[in-house]
Amino acid sequence: MANMQGLVERLERAVSRLESLSAESHRPPGDCGEVNGVSGGVAPSVEAFDKLMNSMVAEFLKNSRILAGDVETHNDVATLLKPISEKIQEIQTFRERNRGSNMFNHLSAVSESIPALGWIAVSPKPGPYVKEMNDAATFYTNRVLKDYKHSDLRHVDWVKSYLNIWSELQAYIKEHHTTGLTWSKTGPVASTVSAFSVLSSGPGLPPPPPPPPPPGPPPLFENEGRKEESSPSRSALFAQLNQGEAITKGLRHVTDDQKTYKNPSLRAQGGQTRSPTKSHTPSPTSPKSYPSQKHAPVLELEGKKWRVEYQEDRNDLVISETELKQVAYIFKCEKSTLQIKGKVNSIIIDNCKKLGLVFDNVVGIVEVINSQDIQIQVMGRVPTISINKTEGCHIYLSEDALDCEIVSAKSSEMNILIPQDGDYREFPVPEQFKTAWDGSKLITEPAEIMA
């Protein structure tokens, strides 16, 4: 808890410095004087951005402090004062290192949408880019709402305040930077003197180097000098061309014993020696392949979550002691088979390859995400199976699970196997669809591919 309190204090100090920076840049001309000979009031886009920071962002930070824990850690604004791209990577790495956190969905929502901070480099329309990042966050915030909407409204407030940031940022971009980041046409040239004087007490970005001095006037006799330098070589060239057929007199005569096609011994030597062109051709260097980092395999119950991670070549994995409120999270497993006995709430398969899963009953949903060659066998019942960004998924349904709904997106090679007469009959899931307008609405149906 002491670490969380320290992070909150760092966050408050960073916000104070940002507020000081904003106040410094908004002083009237009488207070701060002229910059580059130009003075003026506060631009409307700056006022709108301050309003966004002081309303939606402040509300989100307040809710993060209430929740504390891992959710607050990623909001340490002081770390974002370094290059944005590096900080985005740190936030995403923090999420990967805390997959066992009970607030993993919170961290995922931020990790998936935080690249929206790079909107200033998006052109011509940064607004849709921010909306795309907002939609990525919604996938995980919906999970947070599902888990806490009836138990802890603080998490609901956190979700609303976070999504409001991106919604308001979209509105801000639409009003002031519709086609990309705009700069003042009459204001001073961007300078780091006033900006970084406020942040000099804390960590911040180093000031960029000053612009190069303007080039001097071109030499008056530059072209004449070039003509004089090139005249001797040009004269020599024309002299050689004027020789006409006499230019071949300087060539050496090649006798028959020096011709390769008439001297077999020269051909034998030529096969053993490298040509001059090949000897000077540098061989392409293949990029160094670094071995992937090995993680310790995990099979443990953490709170109400069964963690099955980094298992390889294991066909004896079994989870037998289960409860209705427990969930199973399977991550980065390869060439393994897992059996889950009893009844659990939900199962998630993430980034797995050649994994076999056998389970009895699931009261919620089974999700398969970013995986390859997955086989699932249902022994009891399951209401919904979701398949996203997966290549190869075979689902064996039981007699009791024939009413299961299969939801798929951006996936291929999916097959559902239905029990019939003591065996299974395979049915492929459509991957190609056709859409047509019937006069009032769009009609979408699977496309029939004729051989």
Image (tube, rainbow, N blue to C red):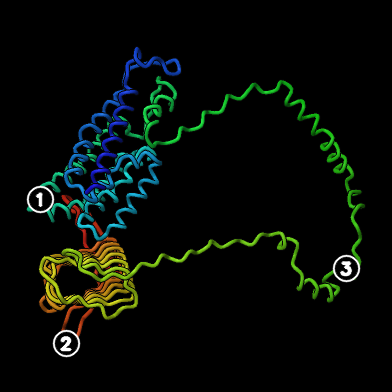
Q: Which residue is mark 3?
A: 258
Q: Which residue: 91% across, 48% down?
A: 246
Q: Amino acid at mark 1?
A: Asp
Amino acid at circle 2: Gly
Location of residue 451 in the rendering, given as x and y in whole percent from the top left corner? 33, 73
Q: Earlier in the sequence, mark 3 or mark 1?
A: 1
For numbered disc 3, what is the local secondary structure?
A: helix
- Which residue lies under the disc numbered 2? 422
Distance of mark 3 from mark 1, alpha carbons?
94 Å
Residue at the extreme left: 150
Q: Mark 1 or mark 2, which has the lower sequence index? A: 1
Name the element at disc 2. loop
Name the spot of residue 357 as percent of width and height, x first: 23, 75
Question: Considering the numbered disc 1 on the image, is that residue within a helix, a strand or a loop?
Answer: loop
Residue 29 is situated, as x and y percent measured from the top left of the image, at: 35, 14
**185 versus 406 height, above or below:** above
Q: Nearer the viewer, residue 338 or 320?
A: 320
Q: Residues within 10 Å of mark 2 (few under 14, many from 20)?
A: few
Question: How many numbered discs, if any?
Answer: 3
Q: Relative to the observer, which residue lies in front, 54 or 38?
A: 54
Above or below residue 224? Residue 8 is below
Residue reaching furthest to the front: 2
Residue 323 position by quadrant: bottom left
The reply to whether residue 302 is visible in this rendering is yes
Question: Which disc, if any, is residue 152?
Answer: 1
Query: Mark 1: few, some, or many residues within 10 Å (few <14, many ≥20)?
Result: few
10 shown above or below 309? above
How far is the residue under mark 1 from the one under mark 2?
48 Å
Question: Nearer the N terminus, badge 3 or badge 2?
Answer: 3
Residue 132 visible in the shown view: no
Mark 1 and mark 2 residues within 8 Å of each other at the beta carbon: no
Indicate the amino acid at tag 3.
Gln
